[in-house]
Image: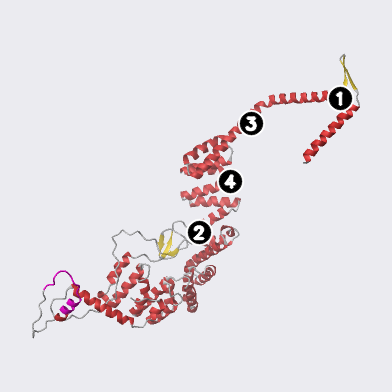
Amino acid sequence: MIRVLLFFAVLIALAFGEAWLVDRPGELVLNWQGYRIETSVLVGIGAIFVAAAALVALWSVIRFIFKFPSLMALATRGQRRERGYAALSRGMIAVGAGDALVARKASAEAQKLLRDEPLALLLKAQAAQLSGEASQAAAAFEEMSKRNDMRLLGLRGLHVEAQRQGDVEKAQQYVDAAHQIAPLPWAAKANFDHKVAAGDWRGALALLEGASGAKLFDKTIRERQRAVLETAIALEKADAQPAEALTLARAALKRAPTLVPAIMLAARLARDSGDVRKATKLIETSWAATPHPDLAKIYLGLHPGDSSAGRLARALTLARLAPREAESKIMIAQAAIAAGDYKAAREAMQPLIEGPERPTARMCRFMAEIEEKQHGAAGYFREWLTRASHAPRDPTWVADGVTSDQWRPISPVTGQLDAFVWQKPVERLSSGDEVEEAVFAQILPPVPPLLLGEAQSKSLSSAPVTPQAEPPVAKPEAGAAVVTDEEPPAPEQSRTEEMAALVQQQDEEKEQPKEFAQLFDVKRK
């Protein structure tokens, strides 16, 4: 709007000027070289403006003629630059899509058209990485590291290539050089990972506790990793400096109360120092959240002078804190076996072997131990051992597919901190020829042999009716002596006798006390 007003103001000013000149006519006379030129003032001013415009046009033509070569060169450079950026975009897209052939061609074209362009050098390195040409990628990153505007990018690329080649020393050198230029998060993270992989727990802990550690992870993850590092240091000092190790373990528990290795170490060191009460409270406090077999082992061994019955009582005390956990039931069964209370051991294991999930190998081995100690060779301990060989594996420490009986701070595969997790290993697929699982009933004492007449009558009364005729059975004559050491009864008779005795045994068990069954919510057969 302001521009329109200014335009009209200029037009009005020109109109007033022209009217003023028309109202005041005059003459202009030019005498030059014998020529006399007479004209009005208005025409003279117009001629001056025309001459000025002609001079400007002439100067523009002359200037264009002299600048034509440079203009042609500028246009050529613009076309090359446009083609170069088009190749650069095509190459970047090819790298993102994983097309190595197109990426290499686009990189060569971009390098030819854009010699000093940083992105062209980056495309060259990425295309080489995509093609698996490590030496060319390293050369491109080395060239980047020599330029001021790409030094950090080049050092990061060299660090990645050194890691791929497994050269830890060179990778650490590149990280240190980058960290001196600027304390970037990737350099701090890489430095932290190198210290962790090398087992430098104190150096890694110092990085986490420094200012750069706050930029690496959020508060929750950082506190967890600090607890893991403190536990690792405490494990190394447990034998030589138990007091300092106990302090570190307690500090780790404050940061991560569910860290099982820290709980076990703190409880063991407290027990060794004579503070059994503290160790007991520590395990009892954490048992509901982290039931672990090693914690149960330490808890039951806190009082070496306890009898087997005392250990069973302590196991019951700890199990009440997490009565539905499998480890609580297994702990009860183990203590009951040691005390000779096989009935309590069976009742503790019953929810595990009859639950919706398949019993693990350790559960099957416990059942085999119960059968062997209670019934000896007559028990089903061999069947339970066979079942254990095909049962799912028990939870253990797993990291990147590697299992370990003991917890470790880092993964042996990737070197990642806090990688071990207490879980069940991945089960293998069944081959289809595994042993079919059987229902293992309680072993009964051997049944005394029946008289010949009683066996025949019991067999006839309980045998199923078949279309085939039964062979005639010779009845003993009157007054004849009864012979007891005849041939053993038929297999159908033995099975019938065992089933009858089993039903009688189950009826008797239903009338027995249920203190362990009530504790674990056992459903009897």
How far is disc 3 from disc 4 in space, using C-alphas? 31 Å
* Residue mark closest to the camera, 2 vs 3: 3
Q: In this view of the protein, can residue 68 be seen by the observer?
A: yes
How far is disc 2 from disc 1 in space, using C-alphas? 93 Å
Q: Quadrant of residue 210?
A: bottom right
How far is disc 3 from disc 1 in space, using C-alphas? 45 Å
Residue at numbered disc 3: 74
User: Label 3's element?
Assistant: helix
Nearer the N terminus, badge 2 or badge 3? 3
Would you say 188 lies left or right of 406 here? right
Q: Mark 3 belongs to which amino acid?
A: Leu
* Residue mark closest to the camera, 3 vs 1: 1
Q: Which residues are magenta?
A: 455-471
* Residue mark closest to the camera, 2 vs 1: 1
Residue at numbered disc 2: 196
Q: Mark 1 belongs to which amino acid?
A: Leu
Q: Mark 4 belongs to which amino acid?
A: Arg
Q: Quadrant of residue 293?
A: bottom left
How far is disc 2 from disc 4 in space, using C-alphas? 26 Å
